[in-house]
Image (cartoon, helix red, strand yellow):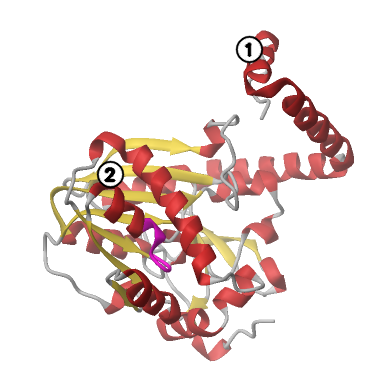
Amino acid sequence: MVKIDWAHLEQVACNLCQNTETQLLATNSRFNIPLNTVICTHCGLIYHNPRMTFDGFANFYEQDYRCLIEHDTRPVAELFQAQIKHGERILTWLDTYLSRGMRVLDIGSGPGGQLWAFRERCGAQVMGVEPAVEHAQWARETHALDIRSGMLEDFSFDTNSFDLVIISQTLNHLLDPFGSLQHVHSQLAPNGKIFLEVIDFVYWTRLSTLTMATTIDHPYMFAQETLRAMIEQAGFEIVKWEADEDMPNRTREPGQPNLHIRVLGVKSEPRTVKYPSYRDILKRIENNQRIYQRKHRWYWVYARIDRAKGMLRRIMGERGWNTMKNLAGERHMP
């Protein structure tokens, strides 16, 4: 059980628009940790307030994060192999936007599997930043990967240092996501690119309770509209966008829920953006919670239907299953 160090909590303004007016969403979070989750009434950004200070958050990652979130710490070599597979999926998704020998930075790189895939598959010059000291050290000693241990805020790179920055499943974990995007903007070469993979918090509330969707390691949470606004205001032109919510037939990646938004942005000029209505975001969250509660009441029925579909899919094979879906016009069959 993680004990919150109340001496290392602080009240903060909205990270995107600096507004201080908020509406309370929840007072408890996953793992039964008491945290206030609020939504900004100006731009719709969702965050913990109060939240941990920089020192408190760094201590949390050093002492509690792995055991709390992963329950039983995964062997580093196993995590590395899973990251290689995910890195290859990122390479496929980026496809024509890549070039051999490009300079790549991975923020929140873990033991470096994604960077290894970029180095081996397209000859990239790679560097990572990772708060877990043991993961960074393992990557350096085992695979000669240049991964620095620490928080992003600990490092300053030369201007125009990178052609691509990867922030995969990390933006939620940063205490200053907007400032981090601005920092990345300054590190990118002209026409440099950023790849983001972020949990869609609003969609998550359709699949879970609000309490389970909020977690201590995610000080900020995003709806699709607020993520887009933050990226564009930081100075990136979005050239590719994909959300799992819009892809009900997406094959689930082992170990990863279908909750993410993937974005490719190109370095441009910061824009003045129109913020989304927080009321619209709230309305979607409330509607999603009603859908979740309704489905949860009939969970045993849905579980049996899903099991029957899975059995039929195995019997028919993928080609037969897809043919049946097309004939039935059932767009939301998994």
Query: Which is more toward the observer, 75 or 220?
Result: 75
Query: Which is more toward the observer, 180 or 252?
Result: 252
**Residue sitting farthest toward the bottom:** 7
The residue drawn where x is 41% and y is 63% is 14
On screen, residue 103 versus residue 279, left or right, reads left
Question: Does the magenta run of residues contain 113?
Answer: yes
Name the amino acid, label 1: Asn
Q: Is residue 52 above or below residue 186?
A: below
Residue 276 in view, yes or no = no
- Provide the residue span drawn in magenta: 109-114
Q: Is residue 19 above or below residue 139?
A: above
Say whether marks 1 and 2 touch (CB < 8 Å): no
Image quarter where the N terminus lies is bottom right
Secondary structure of the residue carrying tag 1 is: helix
Q: Which residue was labeled with disc 1? A: 326
Where residue 154 sits, quadrant-wise, is bottom left
Q: Which residue was labeled with disc 2? A: 265
Residue 74 pos. (x, y %): 59, 69
The residue drawn where x is 18% and y is 46% is 100
Residue 306 pos. (x, y %): 78, 34
On screen, residue 59 versus residue 178, left or right, reads right
Name the amino acid, label 2: Gly
Secondary structure of the residue carrying tag 2 is: strand
The residue drawn where x is 67% and y is 43% is 206
Would you call the spot at circle 1 few (<14 residues within 10 Å), some (14-19), or many (20 or more)? few
Would you call the spot at circle 2 few (<14 residues within 10 Å), some (14-19), or many (20 or more)? many
Q: Which of label 1 and label 2 is nearer to you?
A: 1
Query: Which is more toward the observer, 167 or 212?
Result: 167
